[in-house]
Amino acid sequence: MKDRKLRVNDKVMVMTGKDKGKIGTVKKILSKSDQIVVENVNMVKKHTKGNPYSGQSGEIQDKEAPVSYSNVSLLCEACASPTRIGYKYTEDNKKYRYCKKCKEILS
Ligand SMILES: [Zn+2]
C-alpha cells in the first residue's frame, strides 16, 4: 500500500480540472480507488427517486463526487499555499508531517 499523506480534515487545493483553484476540506479518503471526497469540490446533481407509494417525491441534491488523489494538493495554513508534504522523525521515532515549502510542522 502506498503511503497516503492526506488525512480527513486536511485543507486541500484542487490543482486540475473544472474546480481548479478551489479549496476545501477532505471529507473522505477512498484508498482503494485512489480518490478523495473534498467538501464543495466536484459537485454533482444527484437525483433521488421518489416513491409514489409512500408519497415521497424525487428530488435533486448537490453532492460531492470523489476526485483523484493526485488532482489535489495539501494547502499549508502556515504559508497559505499548496505544498508537498514531507516526513520527518522525532528523536523518539514519531513520524510527523511538514510543509516542504516553509518547513512548518503540520498537525
Ligand atoms: Zn507551508
Image (cartoon, grey):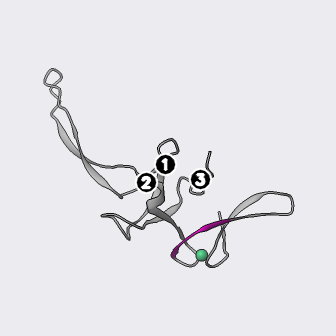
Q: Amino acid at mark 2?
A: Ser
Query: Residue 43 in the image: x percent, y percent?
Result: 30, 54
Per the picture, the main secondary structure of the magenta-coloured stretch is: strand
Q: Is residue 16 left or right of residue 56?
A: right
Whichever of callouts 2 and 3 sits on the residue coming sooner in the sequence is 3
Q: Could you say whether the residue bearing mark 2 is in a helix, strand or loop?
A: strand
Q: Amino acid at mark 3?
A: Arg
Q: Is residue 2 magenta?
A: no
Q: From mark 2 to mark 3, how far is it between C-alphas?
A: 13 Å
Q: Residues within 10 Å of mark 2 (few under 14, many from 20)?
A: some
Residue wearing tag 2: 68
Q: From mark 1 to mark 3, how far is it between C-alphas?
A: 9 Å
Q: Is residue 93 left or right of residue 17?
A: right
Q: Is residue 85 magenta?
A: yes
Residue wearing tag 1: 34
Q: Amino acid at mark 1?
A: Asp
Whichever of callouts 2 and 1 sits on the residue coming sooner in the sequence is 1
Whichever of callouts 1 and 3 sits on the residue coming sooner in the sequence is 3
Q: Could you say whether the residue bearing mark 1 is in a helix, strand or loop?
A: loop
State the extent of the magenta-drawn residues as a range. 81-86
Q: Could you say whether the residue bearing mark 3 is in a helix, strand or loop?
A: loop
Q: Mark 1 and 3 residues: CB-CB less than 8 Å, in contact?
A: no
Residue wearing tag 3: 4
Residue located 33% across and 64% down the image = 19
Which corner quadrant holds the C terminus?
bottom right
